[in-house]
Amino acid sequence: MVTSLEKELKRQVTVDGAQYILTLHPDGFRLTGKGKRKPQVELHWRDLLSGDAAMAVALNASLAHESPPRPTASGAGRPSSRKPIKAAR
C-alpha cells in the first residue's frame, strides 16, 4: 500500500559533506542548503516528467560554467596595435 503525499515532507541529506534539506510536496520538491532560505533546486513534478527540468538544468549548468570568449586565431574583430608586415622585394 502506498501513502499519498498530501503535505510537505522534510528530510536532511548530505551531499559531498554539505547538508541540505529536501522538501517533498504535492507539486514537486525543493533542495535547500541547511540554514538557508532560498532553495538551490526547485522542480515541479510536471516539469520533471515533461523533460523541461532536464533542459533547465543543462542551461543553468552551461551558464554557470561559461568562460569568457577566447580570441580567434586570426584576431578578427579586434583592433591590432601591430603594424602590418610588408613583403620583401
Image (spheres, rainbow, N blue to C red):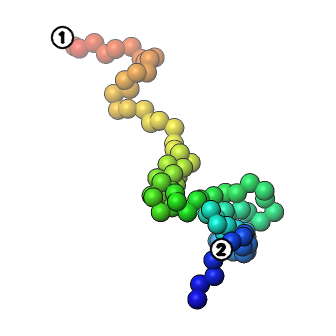
Indicate whether 80 appears above or below 58. above
Find the distance from the CA under tag 1 to the CA under tag 2.
84 Å
User: Residue 9 falls in which quadrant of the image?
Assistant: bottom right
- Which corner quadrant holds the C terminus? top left
| Amino acid bearing label 2 | Leu
| Amino acid bearing label 1 | Arg
- Which corner quadrant holds the N terminus? bottom right
Q: Which is in the foreground here, disc 1 or disc 2?
A: 2
Q: Earlier in the sequence, mark 1 or mark 2?
A: 2
In the figure, is residue 71 to the left or right of 87? right
Residue 88 in the image: state x and y as whole percent: 22, 13
Rate crowding at label 2 as few (under 14), some (14 to 19) or many (20 or more) other CA atoms within 10 Å. few
Q: Is residue 46 visible?
A: yes
Residue where numbered disc 1 is placed: 89
Residue at (64% x, 66% y) in the render: 26
| Mark 1 residue element | loop
Indicate whether 55 appears above or below 14. above
Residue at (66% x, 69% y) in the render: 24
Residue at (51% x, 42% y) in the render: 67
> Residue 5: which numbered mark, if any?
2
**Nearest to the observer: residue 35 or residue 16:** 35
